[in-house]
Amino acid sequence: MTLTELRYIVTLAQERHFGRAAERCFVSQPTLSVAVKKLEEELGLALFERSKSTVQVTPHGERIVEQAQRVLEQAALIKEMASEGKDQLVSPLRIGAIYTVGPYLFPHLVPALTQLAPRMSLYIEESFTSVLRRKLRNGELDVIIVALPFNEPDVVTKTLYEEPFEILLPSDHPWTERAAIPKEDLLTERLLLLGEGHCFRDQILEACPAISAQLNNPDNTLTAEGGSLETIRHMVASGLGITVLPRLAIGTNHYENGLLESRPFAGTPPTRSVALAWRASFPRPKAIDALIQAIAQAQDHDTEAA
């Protein structure tokens, strides 16, 4: 029994005529007739009653033809699924990003990726690096956006961009009169930091080791913590201190009346490398390529906006 034979009996049941059925199946009438007879012999059952003027489906043949139609539909569905599998920009793409990247990159990334791959639906998630690492390894996410270093067996990483850190100030802060701020001066101001567990906090402490020593001082009153960069930015706008942010998250234009200003570090600024990570076995390299291209477009948008 073959799909071709099933297609023959379904078409014959619809046409009730061997000639018309053969024409629809693009075969000769004898070829179709022989194939139908062969199937009937295999099943040990007559599917059709034949006469000189017409062809009728037998009662048992009706049930078999109905089942054959369902089989053909399922076979067509399998082919469609396989076709979608060949198009790597059709299936959903599950993207994760660390908290200090996602909110600032996704609003520009998602429209760019939708334009590049309109049939590829997206699932996006923000979390800590440790959570994203686990979900990538377990297959719950396809690709993640993290800060380097990021080392994981059988995972490929690609650096996307280098992002400098800047100092965010209330607009009435005396430092706004300066073109750049030395790292050491941060120790003289109330510095607002992310809480433990955020990799960006660790990056700041690595770039400015003296701040780490200050945090460990029991008499420390010059640092405070916030749960997100947005919370910290609002605290700076309220005059509660200053902070260090990645350039993408500065967002001074989000506030009316010039409440915030930013200044670069003097000399070589601290930076972070933002990278894409995905399993080496991930079978859709074209989806990764489209994502990389969309991130580049999102970065261009941010540069123009700045």
Image (cartoon, grey):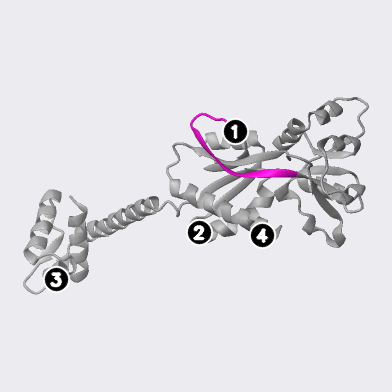
Q: Amino acid at mark 4?
A: Glu
- Is residue 80 inside the magenta stretch? no
Q: Marks 4 and 2, Cα distance to the nearest angstrom?
A: 20 Å
- Density class for disc 3 (Cα within 10 Å; few <14, some 14-19, many ≥20) is some
* Residue indicated by mark 1: 150
SS state under label 4: helix
Q: Quadrant of residue 151?
A: top right
Q: Which residues are magenta?
A: 151-165
Of labels 3 and 4, earlier in sequence is: 3
Of labels 4 and 2, earlier in sequence is: 2
- Density class for disc 4 (Cα within 10 Å; few <14, some 14-19, many ≥20) is few
Q: Quadrant of the C terminus?
A: bottom right
Labels in figure, total: 4
Residue 140: x percent and y percent? 54, 40
SS state under label 3: loop
Of labels 2 and 1, earlier in sequence is: 2
Q: Quadrant of residue 65?
A: bottom left
Q: Is residue 59 left or right of residue 29?
A: right
Question: What kind of secondary structure does the magenta stretch mostly adopt?
Answer: strand
* Residue indicated by mark 3: 17
* Residue indicated by mark 2: 116
Which-is-in-front pick, marks 4 and 2? 4
Asked if 199 appears above or below 292 in the picture, the reply is above
Q: Nearer the viewer, residue 12 or 103?
A: 103
At 70% across and 35% down in the image, what residue appears?
A: 199
At 78% across and 32% down in the image, what residue appears?
A: 208
